[in-house]
Image: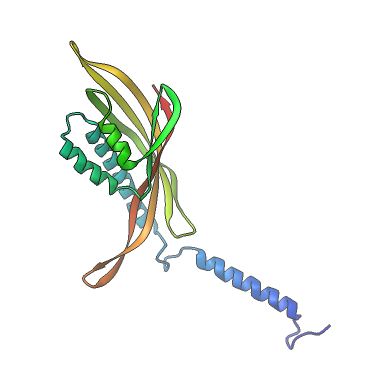
Amino acid sequence: MQRNINGVRPLSLFVLFFLFALSASLQAQQPSPQNDDYISPERKKAIDSLALEKVRDLSKYIAIVGDKSTPFSEADRVIQRTLELFAPGSEMGVSSVNSTEILYYGVRTYLERLMQLNYDRVEIEWYNIQYISDLERQPDGKYVGVITIYQRFSGYKEGYEGNVLLYKDTTKKDITVYVERKETQIGGRTIGFWDVLLGDVRVTETRR
């Protein structure tokens, strides 16, 4: 059988070359300290803190918008601030203990419906905010994680003897978190940074 000058069959040489190329390709896909897509443990800790802070901001904004004493102009301003937290096309889930159906609305629509709830007083509290799915790198270079929260909702009607509780539930929700590498121009220089945006808010459990 014919061999090349090094004593290796041509077919075997091709296979070796293919495996070498495949190995190099896989190594290139792995994030490293020299790769802009690499997130160091220190940077990840800062990103996690920012994501949790944005979720806490969302909880405050929802409470303000849902509060019947909030002036319309203030509620509208807060809605604009809330939209800035989310990735385009994100949706928020709505559920009830009186139904098994879960409805999803765009963020603005969700907040506008919240303002129109037929109660005289609304109280909304978020608690137990924490990661349940760590940030994982996606093929497009973004990182995706999930933060879970519990929401306590109470709706009251005014009566002769004070406010009467008409409806109350506790909802568990999972919030998708997107972390993406972006660039901006500062003083003529291109500066890279990690941006954190919230995604869909999905209802996983509703109880009294």
Residue shown at the point (17%, 39%) measured from the top left: 74
Farthest residue, direction bottom: 5
- Apparent side of residue 20 relative to residue 39 in the rendered image (left or right): right
Q: Is residue 79 left or right of residue 94?
A: left
Q: Nearer the viewer, residue 112 or 27?
A: 112
Q: Position of residue 145 (x, y in %)?
A: 42, 48
Q: How is the image coloured?
A: rainbow
Quadrant where the N terminus sits is: bottom right
| Image: 152 above or below 87 | above
Residue 93 location (% of width, % of height): 39, 36
Question: Taking 111 as reference, is 194 above or below it?
Answer: below
Q: Position of residue 118 (x, y in %)?
A: 27, 24
Residue shown at 24%/42% (left/top)?
79
How many numbered discs? 0
For the C terminus, which image quadrant?
top left
Relative depth, front residue between 100 and 22:
100
176 lies above or below 72: below
Q: Position of residue 151 (x, y in %)?
A: 34, 31
User: Which residue is pictured at 62% across the width and 73% down the height?
Assistant: 20
Q: Quadrant of residue 43?
A: bottom left
Q: Residue furthest top?
A: 161
Q: Residue at horizontal 34%, vertical 52%?
A: 196
Of 130 and 61, which appears nearest the observer? 61
Depth check: 86 or 12 in front?
86
